[in-house]
Image (spheres, grey):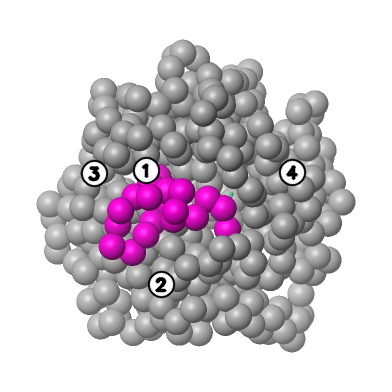
């Protein structure tokens, strides 16, 4: 790309961020997602920092202002009523002062805050804002291991597919069979009003999403009980890798700010997690897989979740194998990294997390591979991402075979990632 084209693309990305900026938080896109989403906000902050550092810190502060007393940071904050999204606060009924959902999302905040801090032009502001966030992020990490790893195995489970951020991945299909659908209250979906139903989860999946929600609600959203009471407990390598990376980054940040207790606790969590990740490795697939905690078996589904593990400081030979996986996928799909392996007949190139490419995932994989010495493969991922933007705009996700735009348009975190890719390219 010429430097003029880079400047123009960044300017277009900034326009998308500004359009979705509500003042103290951003929404993922108008219509489809009218509230604040957890990991969207943390990754979006990196893009905001490009033109307004104070605003970037505020994005994460706003999210943590709605942290639960037990330490959980919810996946959605329903700041302002909007009937365009289902399930809304009237369904979750978590009873928070500002309504939130009752489940969480990938813990990318520790990574994002460290990156904001490291790159800050205004060091005084960064130190003050990071120092205030440190104990909150630490409490969230503690919450994860206490509530989602009750046996202290070093890996946390998600108890609802939405927690993974990869809502309808093929990874969840088998475990999802155990989730009943009886007793689900009647409902009307809103996502299919804003996006093509063929690009969205199916009705059967939605019933199960809602059954779990109702089940957790009936237990009073008491996190001490939810893990063991859930028929769905899956250990996702990508989700754990993000948490492990966030713990390691928070440890470094805490060290730099003289908070040695927080540093030590997070260093230990990261170390324990990295050791435990080996349990998820599959020689047959050459990548990590999800583990169904209910059956104790690895799940036979080669999704991008197992490649996203590159985001953590995994052993060199594992990173090399994941780089080889991406190269293999690049030979099978025009654009990398597809959210599922095109060799698997279950791939659905247009349906959300069952095949399409997502730029946030690309960003984290590329970042991890660069750190692991595989800048060549990381550059390939970056190139694919930029090609998609040029050809199809700032879509929610993209068809890995045709590059066509899918889901919602003018998407905030896609725009933020483009700024990131271009400043790193
Ligand atoms: C979808 C995605 C999730 C994201 C949310 C808002 O639910 O699966 O990862 O956080 O949309 O963009």
* x and y, in percent, of residue 160 in the image: 47, 36
The alpha-carbon separation of the residues under discs 1 and 3 comes to: 12 Å
> From this viewpoint, is residue 41 visible?
no
Mark 2 lies on residue: 59
Name the N-terminal-most of marks 2 and 3.
Answer: 2
At label 1, counting other C-alpha atoms closer than 10 Å, the crowd grade (few under 14, some 14-19, many 20 or more) is many
Mark 4 lies on residue: 351
Residue 163, placed above or below residue 212: below
The part of the chain drawn in magenta is: 85-105
Name the N-terminal-most of marks 1 and 3.
Answer: 3
The alpha-carbon separation of the residues under discs 2 and 4 comes to: 29 Å
Mark 1 lies on residue: 244
Q: Residue at x 28, y 82 (%)?
A: 125
The alpha-carbon separation of the residues under discs 2 and 3 comes to: 22 Å
Do callouts 2 and 3 mark residues in contact (Cβ within 8 Å)? no
Relative to 265, 74 lies left or right: right
Q: Which mark is residue 142?
A: 3
Q: Residue at x 35, y 35 (%)?
A: 218
Indicate yes or no: mark 3 CB to ligand 1 under 8 Å. no
Q: Which mark is residue 285?
A: none
The alpha-carbon separation of the residues under discs 1 and 4 comes to: 29 Å
Do callouts 1 and 4 mark residues in contact (Cβ within 8 Å)? no
The secondary structure that dominates the magenta segment is loop
């Amino acid at each position: 790309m010429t430097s003029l084209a880079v400047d123009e693309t960044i300017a277009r990305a900034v326009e998308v961020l500004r359009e979705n900026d509500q003042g103290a938080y951003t929404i993922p896109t108008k219509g489809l997602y009218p509230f604040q989403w957890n990991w969207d906000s943390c990754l979006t902050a990196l893009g905001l920092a490009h033109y307004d550092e104070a605003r970037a810190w505020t994005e994460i502060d706003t999210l943590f202002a709605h942290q639960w007393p037990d330490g959980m940071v919810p996946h959605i904050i329903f700041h302002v009523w909007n009937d365009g999204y289902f399930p809304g606060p009237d369904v979750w009924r978590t009873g928070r002062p500002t309504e939130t959902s009752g489940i969480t999302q990938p813990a990318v905040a520790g990574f994002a805050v460290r990156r904001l801090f490291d790159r800050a032009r205004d060091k005084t502001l960064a130190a003050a804002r990071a120092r205030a966030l440190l104990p909150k992020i630490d409490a969230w990490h503690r919450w994860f291991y206490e509530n989602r790893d009750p046996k202290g195995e070093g890996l946390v489970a998600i108890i609802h597919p939405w927690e993974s951020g990869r809502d309808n991945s093929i990874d969840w299909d088998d475990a999802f069979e155990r989730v009943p659908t009886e007793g689900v209250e009647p409902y009307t979906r809103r996502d299919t009003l804003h996006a093509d139903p063929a690009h969205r989860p199916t009705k059967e999946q939605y019933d199960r999403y809602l059954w779990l929600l109702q089940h957790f609600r009936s237990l009073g959203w008491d996190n001490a009980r939810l893990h063991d009471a859930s028929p769905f407990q899956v250990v996702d390598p990508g989700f754990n890798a993000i948490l492990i990376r966030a713990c390691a980054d928070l440890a470094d940040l805490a060290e730099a700010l003289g908070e040695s207790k927080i540093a030590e606790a997070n260093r230990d969590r990261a170390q324990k997690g990295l050791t435990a990740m080996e349990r998820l490795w599959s020689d047959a697939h050459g990548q990590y897989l999800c583990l169904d905690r209910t059956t104790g078996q690895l799940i036979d589904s080669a999704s991008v979740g197992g490649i996203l593990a590159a985001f953590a400081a995994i052993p060199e030979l594992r990173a090399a194998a994941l780089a080889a996986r991406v190269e293999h996928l690049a030979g099978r799909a025009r654009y990398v990294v597809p959210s599922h392996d095109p060799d698997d007949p279950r791939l659905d190139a247009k349906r959300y997390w069952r095949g399409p490419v997502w730029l946030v995932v690309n960003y984290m994989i590329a970042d991890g591979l660069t750190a692991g010495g595989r800048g060549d493969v990381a550059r390939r991922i970056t190139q694919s991402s930029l090609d998609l933007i040029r050809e199809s705009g700032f879509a929610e996700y993209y068809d890995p075979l045709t590059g066509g735009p899918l889901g919602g348009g003018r998407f905030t975190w896609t725009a933020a990632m483009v700024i990131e890719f271009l400043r790193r390219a």
